[in-house]
Each structure stands twice: as structure tokens, then as C-alpha cells.
Amino acid sequence: MRIINDCHIGTLRQAGTTPVSQAALTEYIHAQFTKLVTAPSLAGRECLDLVINGDLFDGFTVDPRELLWTYTVLAEWLEDVREKSLTLVAGNHDWAPKAGKLSSFHLLADLLRHRFPAQVTVVDHTTGLTLLHIGHQVWAIPHMPNQDLFDLELEKALQADWRGHLLLHANYDDNFAVGSDHSLSVSQDQAKALIDAGWTLVFAHEHQSRNPMNGLHVVGNQFPTSVADCLGNERKHYLEFRDDVMHEVECWDRNLTFIDTDWRHLDKDFDGIQFIRVSGNALAEEAEAAINAVNSLRKRSTALVISNAVRVEGLAEMDKLAGLTLEDVSGFDVLGALCAELTEVEAKVVRGLLE
């Protein structure tokens, strides 16, 4: 069994791209996904069962061309490997509380299940398939509508008579996520209880790999779609399960495709670099020059994404603005900052006047 996650097909980057580089980013995502689906196994066999552990698409709905492209790739793979299975696990980007609307993920799942009923399994709360055995001593819990329902699924796993690898699409030990239904979290206590009960936890959703404790593996995504994805691990990997043993298979090397460079040194040759982070400090009077330098690089470079992380030194003494980049400043919520300084009654009056 091969397990991949967080492919985010249909990603549209408004910041850091041009129309040309956005089109190139789409092609890059297509190539990386196809490679993950069709690559030979670690042991040299032609193919394995495939599990996509959440966030196949970047949003609830994506461009129909992206949906059709994904369907074609997976359908052709299923046609070629009739003895193998595809499991689609719903992630937080694959579902939203939009009554009566069908997501791109669910439309794709319905199309594939209709054509390949014996090969395709969908793990999703809307079908009632939540804590589900998907083969090879591997179980999966999909993204749930809220933290309480997710906690109930974790409790089911804790009380179950069987044990193995448990696939999750959630944060690990993220208190912020607990208050947001869009992202779920497994606490340290929950994780320890499940591990002590005999489970090995395998997390998708977070894009950087880490192993906070024995028996818990945060996989990270397999390829970046943004500069932020490049700032953690030097390498990315997917998982293969063979004889109930989990193997990491490296599939991306940061040193080959990413660079962080000062905005004053953009006259270098960046051929072959796909993700560029432009950093450094700029005085207030240098801000325009820094912006122009980054924009000029975006126009002439073949990089997929070029982010502007230049810091404006003139803002450093302002506590709430310290450390902001130029792009952060351009998107600053003035009304929100104002209302944060007012009482609830005063803020209500200000918003009423504006309305």
C-alpha cells in the first residue's frame, strides 16, 4: 500500500505568481501527482494499492478542468491495475458545510466508484464510513464536521478490539485548531492513549514531517505548492506499507528546487529553482526599490512561486507590526486593528456607521 496526502490539485496562488508562472505551477502539480500515482514500488514491483489521505484538491470546488484531469489520471491507473485498489480519504479541503452542494472531491469519488465499484473506497463521514479498515492492518478516520465528532471517532478506535496503523487528517497537539471546525487536532493525551492501546498514528494535513513521539508520524506533504512548504524539512517523503512495516520513500529534495536570497542580490542565475523566497531588510525609503526588484525577478524568472519576505525596518518599533513583510502590510486589516483597540460597544458603533 502506498499512502500520499495533501496534493492540493487546483491550487491557485494569487501572491508570488504571474499568469505564466501560475500555469507552470499547475503543470508542476500535475507532473508530481502523476509520478506519485504511477511510480514503481520501493521493492521494485509495478504498483501498490493507493491511498490518498485527504486534501486531494485545494478547495471545496476547483476548476472543472482540474477535476477532469484528476479523474483521467486515476481512471487510467485503475484500468491498468485491475487487481489494485484506490482509497480516497476526505480531508478538510474536501468538505465544507455547504448544504445541497457537491464538492469536487465527492463528484470525483462518485464518478470513480460508479466506474470501478470493486476497486474504489471512499472514507468520508457523509457516507457513514468513518473509522474504516482499508486493508494491510491500516484503518482511516476522515475529516469530520467538528472536533466533537472527531473525538468520538478517536474514542471508537481506542475502544476497538483491533489495532494497527491509524490514518488521520488532522493537526497534532494544536490548540488553535481545536477551536476551528476547518482543522481538527489530536491532543498529546489522546495520542498517548491510542499509542498505549497499540495504535501507530499516521497524520496527514500538516505539510512538514515530524515524529513527536514513538508511534506517531506526521508525514508532511510530498511536494511543495508554495514557498512556505519549502521552509521546514529538507526532504519530503511518502509511505509504503509492506508486510505491515511502514517505509518512508523520499520524493523531494529542497536543495535542488528552493533558494532563500536577499532582495539586493537578485541578479543571480536562478535557473532550475522552482521556489524562491526573497528576504532581507529594507529601510522605508528602500521599500519601493525592494518591491520593484521582486517584481522584475517574477517577470524574467522561470520559478513557479517567488515570495516577498522583505522586512521593512521602519516598522520594527511598532509592536503589532514588527516583522511584517511588504506583502503582509499590503493586506493589513485596518478596520480590524482599529476595532481591537475599542470596547465591544464602540466597535459596534464604528461598524454600524460604516454600514
Image: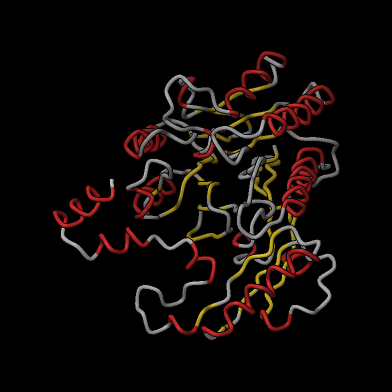
Using the image, determine if residue 145 lies above or below residue 289. above
Residue occupying the far left of the picture = 345
Residue drawn at the location 55% of the way across and 85% of the way down: 285
**Would you say 355 lies left or right of 244 here?**
left
Q: Find residue 166 and report its horizontal and vertical position in percent.
A: 52, 40
Q: Nearer the viewer, residue 238 or 248?
A: 238
Q: Find residue 280 and report its horizontal and vertical position in percent.
A: 60, 81
Q: Find residue 355 and report its horizontal and vertical position in percent.
A: 28, 45
**Image quarter (top left, top right, bottom left or bottom right) of the N terminus:** top right
Q: Nearer the viewer, residue 238 or 265?
A: 265
**Would you say 147 lies left or right of 198 here?**
left
Using the image, determine if residue 205 lies above or below residue 15. above
Q: Nearer the viewer, residue 127 or 81?
A: 127
Using the image, determine if residue 155 lies above or below residue 84. below
Q: Find residue 222 and report its horizontal and vertical position in percent.
A: 68, 51
**Would you say 275 lies left or right of 145 here?**
right
Residue drawn at the location 58% of the way across and 72% of the way down: 309
